[in-house]
Image (cartoon, rainbow, N blue to C red):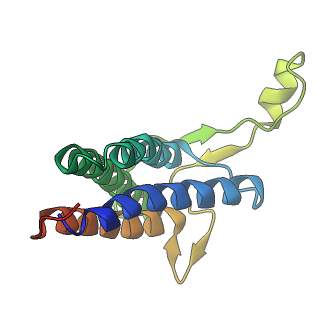
Amino acid sequence: MKSLPLARAIALILPLAMLGGAYAFQFIGGLHPCEMCWWQRYAHFAAVPLAIVAYATRGKACVSALFTGLAGLAIGIGGAVGLFHAGVEYGWWQGLTACSTSPAGGSSADILNQIMATPITRCDVAPWSLFGISMAGYNGLLSGAAALLILVLLLGKGSKA
């Protein structure tokens, strides 16, 4: 498969970039994730080690392609959750959860103050958007496109790894 190296690169770079962006929005921008945001992150967390194994096994094209495909599947699942989450934010359908919390820091000795200081983040409210598309929407679009591209690259004709 002559397009396997590109598929592997996308399978590793995209989830790392999405997670990096999510954490930047959280820790620099102060936008705490809701429960469905975490679900999207879990899929990208799964894609990264799968893509690393794909790189580690690049001498065996079939094994590398398998792990690249599994990473692409995880990315696609993250994108599907993102699109579902965006639909909840836009009010197109009902979400599965109402809200979630993120730790706000503080002394572990004072649990009550930590609980009271923890921001409540609703899943049905987009905390940020650009051109009318929320972060969940961008995750859905970018991850979905990347998953499709990985699939197309893996199914493409060629024999060079």
What percent of the width, then of the height, locates residue 131? 53, 84
Query: Residue visible at 26% across and 69% down?
Result: 149
Residue, far bottom: 131
Foreground of the two, 50 or 60: 60
**In the picture, which quadrant includes the C terminus?**
bottom left
Image coordinates of residue 72 in percent, x first then y, are 30, 54
The residue lying at 21 percent from left, 51 percent from top is 61
Q: Residue furthest top?
A: 109
The residue that appears at 33% across and 67% down in the rendered structure is 6
Q: Of 105 and 20, which appears nearest the observer?
A: 20
Judge by depth and name the residue closer to the eye, 38 or 12.
Answer: 12
Please, is residue 53 above or below residue 1 in the view? above
Q: Position of residue 101 (x, y in %)?
A: 65, 38
Residue 58, placed above or below residue 113: below
Q: Give the left or right position of residue 23, taking residue 68 as reference.
A: right
Q: Quadrant of residue 90?
A: bottom left
Return the x and y of residue 99 as percentages of the image width and height: 56, 42
The quarter of the rendered structure image containing the N terminus is bottom left
Say left or right for 150 vs 139.
Answer: left
Q: Is residue 81 left or right of residue 126?
A: left
Q: Residue furthest left?
A: 157
Look at 23% across and 46% down and name the residue there.
60
Q: Along the horizontal axis of the image, is 33 left or right of 66?
A: right
